[in-house]
Amino acid sequence: MNTSTWQPPLIWRAALLFARGLVGLLARLQVTGDVPAHLRRGPLVLAANHISPFDPVVMAAACQTRGIAPRIMATAGLFRVPMFGAAMRHAGHIRVDRGTSAVHRALDDAATAVARGSVILIYPEGRIGLDPGLWPERGKTGAARLALACGAPVVPVAQWGAHEVLPYQAPRGMLRGIARSLWRRPVIRVHFGTPVDLGETGAAHPGAARRATDRIMDALTDTLAPLRPDEPDLPRHIDPGRPSDTSRAHRRRSD
């Protein structure tokens, strides 16, 4: 078995610094909470809410402030972009072919990465959320299955404010959003929460992944709430191009 620990390549470390500078240019970044020192180099699963195309840049900037270089599970479309896709692969990020039979390969690749001591960043919702209030949707089971299979801890990372920088339909409307952000510099808040007690010992038990996923989404919701105390129902900033979908509303698990 290969026990060597994955090390973030120079291109990814440089990109993390660039992300922090970019977010600082467009917004006021406030990062709270932390990841225990012994988990910062993995194995670890970071589970984040997804509200905007700008989220990966925000998460990269926030992780850089905490000395974390996560490998991101990202949609396959990004890997098909000339040059950018090659940089994504070289940086160690993991391609997710959603809606195809190859989607399971992403979890296998992520499990291998975690076993080698990597930090994996995953969006459990599986898409930019379409909840009208921008609260976390019902999660997919990938993050829970990954954590249960590897025995890795899960830290919820909630963020709020990225939706004010880039619109849902970006690149459509992107220049307008950037110009507005340069002028207003909205506050973007990120909080690293407490590791989630998944309440399961393995993925083999019937329903274990679903129950663990609900615990992750409960934790994400609880971590997000203090970041938006004056926006408990609807966000102040309304994106007219964002569709609304309540079919995947997350309902809190009953203990």
Image (cartoon, rainbow, N blue to C red):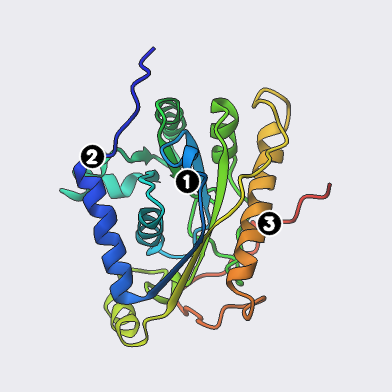
Residue 29 appears in which quarter of the rendering?
A: bottom left
Q: Is residue 206 above or below residue 196?
A: above
- Residue that sits furthest to the top in the current view: 1
Q: Is residue 254 above or below residue 167?
A: above
Name the mark nearer the viewer: 1 or 3: 1
Is residue 247 in view? no
**Sequence order check: which comes first, mark 1 or mark 2?**
2
Name the mark nearer the viewer: 2 or 3: 2
Q: For the residue marked with disc 1, what is the amino acid?
A: Ile
Q: Position of residue 111 (x, y in %)?
A: 46, 28
Quote the CA–CA distance across marks 1 and 2: 20 Å
Give the numbered dot on residue 250. 3
The residue under the point 44% across, 77% down is 187
The residue under the point 61% across, 50% down is 194
Label pair 2/3, CB-CB below 8 angstroms: no
Look at the image and tell me in which quarter the N terminus lies.
top left
Q: Position of residue 200 (x, y in %)?
A: 71, 31
**Sequence order check: which comes first, mark 1 or mark 3?**
1
**Residue on which the image places disc 2:** 9
Quote the CA–CA distance across marks 2 and 3: 37 Å
**Residue on which the image places disc 1:** 122
Is residue 191 in view? yes
Label 1, residues with CA under 10 Å away: few <14, some 14-19, many ≥20: many
